[in-house]
Image (cartoon, rainbow, N blue to C red):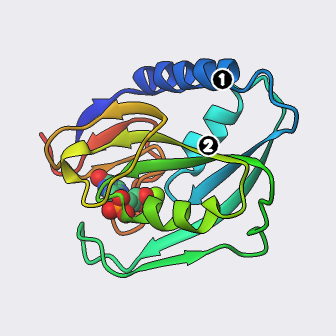
Amino acid sequence: MKILYSAEALFEAVARLGTQINRDYQHQTTPLMLVVVLKGSFIFAADLMRQLTIPCEVEFIRASSYRQGTTAGELCLDWGMTKDFGGRDVLVLEDVVDSGQTLHAILTDLKTQTRTVRLCALLDKPEKHRVPVTIDYCGFQLLGDPFVVGYGLDYAEQHRGLPYIGVLGGA
Ligand code: IMP
Ligand code: MG
């Protein structure tokens, strides 16, 4: 496994995102609603939330695309009981933006009811976007098309527990 972002690099990136979010939302009147896109974002979200000093709440939605290996299939969004975000300031937390289709679907659902909605992604693969997405807070930009695992990210449900992010099969 080739390490791309060490545990230290991830900590620094998450701390930087936390500083930006604390600053941007310091004058809000209602708690920020963090919407965590499961499963891949759970470790990122847990670390980021511990960097936030502003009042915030957390909800989870489940996004799955019936992947074959590393290629995305049909997208399925499960909002559970949590879909009412009427009048809230929402920050969507996503692990990786690849084609952008997951986020596009989530934002389309959310925009009708929220007061504001922004997006925070740990990783962005800008060359892979197939639909327009605006990422308000971004940890790292990944050029090319490496498939990465660790820190919540999986390949066939494996490797989520690695403390770093690496490229599978790399030297
Ligand atoms: P999108 O809808 O094509 O943007 O796909 C985004 C989702 O695909 C992410 O939330 C991840 O769950 C998954 N994904 C995309 N790239 C990777 C990767 O390199 N490693 C692990 N999962 C990935
Ligand atoms: Mg994800």
Residue 116 in the image: state x and y as whole percent: 67, 45
Q: Residue at x 42, y 66 (%)?
A: 157
Which of these two is toward me, 128 or 11?
A: 128
Q: Which image quarter holds the C terminus?
A: top left
Q: Is residue 165 left or right of residue 69?
A: right
Q: Residue at x 16, y 51 (%)?
A: 169
Quick one: label 2 or label 1, which is nearer the N terminus? 1
Label 1: few (<14), some or many (≥20) within 10 Å?
few
Q: Mark 2 belongs to which amino acid?
A: Ala
Label 2: few (<14), some or many (≥20) within 10 Å?
many
- In the picture as drawn, the residue positioned furthest to the right comes out as 29
Q: Residue 104, relative to residue 28: is it above or below?
A: below
* Mark 2 and mark 1: Cα distance apart in space: 18 Å
Q: Which residue is mark 2?
A: 45
**Residue 24, numbered label:** 1
Which of these two is toward me, 54 or 152?
A: 54
